[in-house]
Amino acid sequence: MQYYMPTRIIEDREVVRKNASLLREFGKKAVIITGKHSSKHNGSLEDTIRALESEAIAYQVYHEIEENPSVENVVSAAASCEGVDFVIGIGGGSPLDAAKAVAVLLGNPELEPMEALFGTKQRKVLPMVAIPTTAGTGSETTPYAILTLHKEQTKRNFSIKVFPEIAFMDLRYFLTMGKTTRIHTCIDAFTHLVESYLNTNANSYSDMVCEAGLTSWSKGFPGIAQEVIEEEYMQAFMQASTIAGIAISQTGTSIPHGLGYALTYHHGLSHGHANGLLTPAYLKLFAKKNPEKVRLLLNCSGFEDIAALEKVFAKLLEPIHLSKEQADRYCDEMLQNEAKLRNYPYPITKEELLRFYD
Ligand code: NAP
Ligand code: FE
């Protein structure tokens, strides 16, 4: 049994400004990796630039990270860097994952990008700092980064582990999320807690973390679909998402994440939307083998039973219709994804997988 989480998490109002001096130890020049718009509106980019300037740390900004970033996107970000000592990712999971990829690419300039990112060896990595602005992926506390591989028409976790050195958490940055982004990303955090709790690698430590995360998530839940979310609800979701990151960094995710990638790649669903649609089926499947653990999960998250959860999710998430051929093809692909299948502790048949897409 083991538990390893080296990221220093600091949560506070104006956390970046108050802790600017911590950035000094990472070097003389930073690259800020962020998305196209949101960090300019929620104050996170400006706060970070001010913090760097107050410490006389030079910086450059790359603000072209796409949603579900591709290998090409992160290679172009790394190519824009000159003399950089460390990487700061600001935004949702997409810029945070891209920042991790840039930290690997800059650490290994002599290697081909695909070899650096997806090779089997652990590589040199520049220090990376995470400033999340969605309460979804938990990338600020995971060693993972998911990239889109256009050649393979899917998304894949790259093999190098990059835990952020620091996760700076400031509630103000999360409050600007629109309702749909909030619903989808908060549901992603929920799916992390579900797939970590109901996982081959779950142990007493990860279960304890998941139970705390589910309880926090349930406290945020009354605010999930508010037009303007009340701060106490967003705070609960923010913490649930970071806790969920800690949980999956111990266990990995499982079948809904594996099946969800196809819905994102081929049908354009956001990551949380895709996983949320697939989660009730995972609970039903797991409950056949271990009803007690599913009952504990539902207790912590405040749902009476799976049917109640399914009803709520059906209201929050637009359904998607797949043809038989599509469902069949995605299940065949999933059957090749040994890493995700291994995280479901029981044997699974193709018929059972097809039921996820019903
Ligand atoms: P995202 O793709 O990072 O962002 C989605 C949208 O939300 C973007 O348009 C973004 O705008 C906007 N946005 C971000 N923060 C905002 C804010 N505070 N206010 C208003 N708008 C905001 O979404 P995500 O769901 O957080 O990340 C998804 C990615 O993370 C996927 O690639 C997924 O595979 C990956 N993921 C990673 C892990 C991990 O452990 N590393 C786990 C699960 C998922 P801008 O583009 O303008 O910023
Ligand atoms: Fe996820």
Image (cartoon, grey):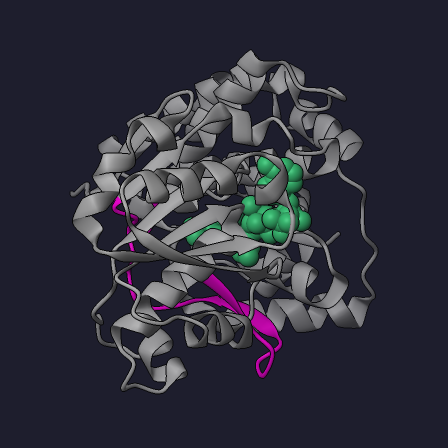
The image quarter containing residue 20 is top left
Prevailing secondary structure class for the magenta stretch in the rendered image: loop
Asked if residue 288 can be seen in this view, the reply is no
Is 317 left, or right, of 128 in this rendering? right
Q: Looking at the image, which is closer to me, 27 or 205? A: 27
On whether residue 144 falls in the magenta region, the answer is yes
On whether residue 113 falls in the magenta region, the answer is no
Q: Looking at the image, which is closer to me, 326 or 110? A: 110
Q: Looking at the image, which is closer to me, 80 or 193? A: 80
Is 190 left, or right, of 30 in this rendering? right
172 in relation to 111, above or below: above
Rendered-image quadrant of the N terminus: top left
What residue is drawn where x is 45% and y is 73%? 80
Residue 238, position as x, y percentages in the image: 48, 27
What residue is drawn where x is 39% and y is 40%? 245
Residue 272, position as x, y percentages in the image: 62, 45
What residue is drawn where x is 20% and y is 43%? 6
What residue is drawn where x is 49% and y is 17%? 299
Asked if residue 183 can be seen in this view, the reply is yes
Read off the magenta span: 142-165
The image quarter containing residue 157 is bottom left
The image quarter containing residue 30 is bottom left
Residue 269, position as x, y percentages in the image: 72, 54
Is 297 left, or right, of 250 in this rendering? right
Residue 346, position as x, y percentages in the image: 41, 52
189 in relation to 358, above or below: above
Q: Looking at the image, which is closer to me, 185 or 172? A: 172
